[in-house]
């Protein structure tokens, strides 16, 4: 029997699709997207709200695996298949001594979805470590390599989000510095949890554990037994303002505003 979108999304709502194809390789993704250009692309279903009246075609991306080309100078240059689980990849990075994404532990969904809204949490975002994205261009019917500088990354935004009908992401390449220490901690709540000062560094595994504990305390780690975690994460964004009230935590944005 056809699985409903309620079974494939973390909000657990959504109708039964007309068709559901599980694509497990790049060539399969390209073939099926070419055959069904208007299909809904689904990764882990953790950032979509689907109507009960939705009955369209769905392509679920489940390609797996990664390749690492590592050197002492460049660090780890890791290309990850779009359907690979994001949190599993973060755990792999921490275990292998690849730094820069440990603060993004516990975010559900797939690697291929992370560039779309420039996934971020606890002072890190994927735009800081993404080198390039390979994607099937539905308009030109060709594979594009989009370098980070052309991804138009912003706060929870990218060229992929602003052009939703153009690309289907096939893989994401990260350039991750080698090491076992985190970047300086830039997030008050995380510094307090780790009992360190802002700007201090801890091991990447300590930081990963602290983030997972903080997230679990807020119902932000998916747990099928805990209804409070059946969500799409935060559904608000921090406001961007010209000036922040005194003592309010704030972060500078590229356009000069404060988040
Ligand atoms: C408990 C919880 C906590 C969360 N915490 C955070 C957080 O801290 N920070 C944060 O930024 N987000 C967070 N999220 C949101 C979500 O996990 C991320 O946005 C994640 O990257 C979505 O991945 P997904 O594979 O589930 O995407 P899906 O929900 O399957 O898809 C999201 C969108 O991307 C498109 N898409 C998916 N894969 C592809 C692809 N390969 N090519 C083209 N388009 C594609 C879909 O069509 C859809 O429009 C959280 C969600 C939950 C449920």
Image (tube, rainbow, N blue to C red):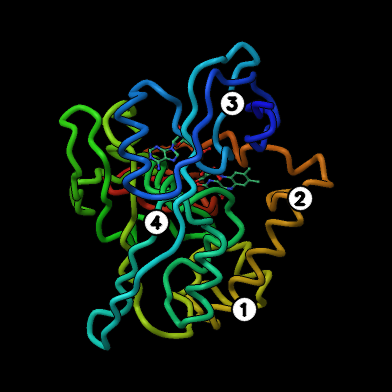
Q: Quadrant of the C terminus?
A: top left
Compared with 239, 181 (above or below) is below
Q: For this view, does 31 lie left or right of residue 201?
A: left
**What is the spatial separation of the Cα atoms under label 4 and label 2, in whole angstroms?**
24 Å
Looking at the rendered image, the disc whose residue lies closer to the viewer, 1 or 3, is 3
Mark 2 or 3 closer to N-term? 3
Compared with 21, 43 (above or below) is below
Label 2–label 1 contact, CB within 8 A: no
Q: Residue at x 18, y 45 (%)?
A: 144
Circle 2 residue: 223
Mark 1 or 3 closer to N-term? 3
Circle 1 residue: 206
Give x and y (percent) for residue 251: 43, 53
Local crowd size for mark 1, using a 10 Å CA cut-off: few (<14), some (14–19), many (≥20)? some
**What is the spatial separation of the Cα atoms under label 1 and label 3, in whole angstroms?**
34 Å
Local crowd size for mark 2, using a 10 Å CA cut-off: few (<14), some (14–19), many (≥20)? few
Give x and y (percent) for residue 169: 34, 44
Mark 2 or 1 closer to N-term? 1
Give x and y (percent) for residue 175: 30, 69
Circle 4 residue: 81
Frontmost residue, 120 versus 231: 231
Secondary structure under tag 3 reads: loop
Label 4–label 2 contact, CB within 8 A: no
Q: For this view, does 17 lie left or right of residue 175?
A: right
Q: Residue at x 25, y 56 (%)?
A: 132
Secondary structure under tag 1 reads: helix
């Amino acid at each position: 029997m056809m699985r409903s979108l309620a079974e494939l999304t973390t909000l657990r709502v959504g109708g039964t699709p007309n068709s559901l194809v599980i694509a497990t390789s790049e060539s399969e993704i390209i073939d099926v997207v070419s055959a069904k250009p208007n299909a809904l692309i689904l990764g882990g279903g953790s950032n979509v709200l689907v109507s009960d009246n939705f009955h369209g075609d769905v392509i679920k991306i489940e390609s797996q695996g990664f390749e690492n080309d590592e050197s002492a100078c460049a660090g780890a240059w890791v290309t990850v298949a779009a359907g690979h689980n994001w949190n599993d990849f973060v755990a792999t990075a921490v275990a292998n001594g690849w730094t820069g994404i440990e603060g993004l532990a516990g975010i559900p969904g797939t690697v291929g979805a992370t560039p779309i809204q420039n996934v971020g949490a606890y002072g890190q975002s994927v735009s800081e470590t993404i080198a390039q994205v390979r994607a099937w261009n539905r308009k030109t019917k060709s594979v594009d390599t989009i370098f980070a500088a052309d991804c138009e990354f912003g706060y929870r935004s990218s060229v992929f989000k602003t052009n939703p009908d153009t690309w289907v992401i096939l893989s994401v390449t990260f350039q991750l510095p080698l090491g076992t220490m985190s970047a300086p901690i830039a997030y008050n709540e995380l510094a307090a949890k780790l009992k360190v000062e802002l700007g201090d560094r801890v091991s990447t595994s300590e930081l990963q554990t602290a983030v997972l504990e903080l997230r679990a305390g807020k119902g932000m780690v998916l747990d099928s037994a805990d209804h409070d975690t059946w969500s799409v994460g935060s559904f608000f964004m921090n406001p961007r303002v010209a000036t922040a009230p005194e003592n309010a935590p704030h972060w500078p944005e590229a356009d000069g505003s404060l988040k």
